[in-house]
Amino acid sequence: MNTLLSSPLAPLLARLFDAAEAATAPALADMSASERDRLLHSRTEYLTLYTRLKDLWLPVSRETGTLLYMLVRSSGARAIVEFGTSFGISTLHLAAALRDNGGGQLISSEFEPGKVQRARAHLAEAGLDDLVEIRQGDALQTLSDDLPGAINLVLLDGAKALYADILDLLEDRLAPGALIVADNADDAPDYLARVRAPGSGYLSVAVGDDVELSMRLA
């Protein structure tokens, strides 16, 4: 059986993607483009932006969700770290792949309490909550310790200005060949420059319009 394509997860994901696509973003209506861009790239005011976006879904695309499942399955990953749970759509894809790999551990971090509550409910509905620990708070603290000794896959999908900082926290624990998926990576130029630099220890390539896929070489 394929967990991703079976009940209860498949109908749940269909419902969640439909809800995300139908949702509006009133928090952005009174924010100028320049203000949004400033907050998006700030390493000190990112909590201000994401507090204002607390009701916004911010999901991965359907295609990226499928890609996440495929990467976890094909790599045999058993230890995953996710930065940015939101309402749990990406988390569900990752956890489904862990289930089909025979088990494992997914540690995810989310700042907004309401999103943590909703994501946990979605995981329970899908029967995947036993595989996932969601840590509530600023990921610079929640992902700073008590992590698996050999992380196989990382999803970066939180505050874009922190992608490089989160990589710093996790780098020593990345297993050789570990995969790092950065969503909306064009909004994280410092991170892109790092993983694409010759001699960086990563092999990196753009996938589609907004995802950077990197592999830890050593």
Image (spheres, rainbow, N blue to C red):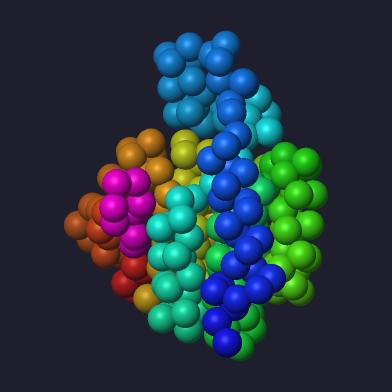
**Residue placed most toward the observer, 170 or 126:** 126
Residue 57 position within the rendered picture, expressed as x and y whole percent measured from the top left: 60, 40
For this orientation, the residue located farthest to the left is: 198
Q: Is residue 206 above or below residue 53?
A: below
What's the residue at 58%, 57% (across, down)?
A: 14
Q: Which residues are magenta?
A: 207-214
Residue 100 position within the rendered picture, expressed as x and y whole percent measured from the top left: 57, 83
Q: Quadrant of residue 41?
A: top left
Residue 178 position within the rendered picture, expressed as x and y whole percent measured from the top left: 42, 72
Report the quarter where the N terminus lies. Answer: bottom right
- Residue 27 is a magenta residue: no
What's the residue at 32%, 72% (across, down)?
A: 217
Q: Main SS type for the magenta part?
A: strand
| Circle count | 0
Q: Is residue 214 above or below residue 73?
A: above
Q: Quadrant of residue 33?
A: top left
**Residue placed most toward the observer, 35 or 43:** 35
Residue 23 position within the rendered picture, expressed as x and y whole percent measured from the top left: 60, 34
Asked whether the viewer can see residue 25, the reply is: yes
Report the quarter where the C terminus lies. Answer: bottom left
Asked whether the viewer can see residue 95, the reply is: no
What's the residue at 36%, 51% (across, down)?
A: 211
**Residue placed most toward the observer, 186 or 173:** 186
Q: Is residue 100 above or below residue 158?
A: below
Q: Is residue 139 left or right of residue 133?
A: left
What's the residue at 45%, 65% (across, down)?
A: 66
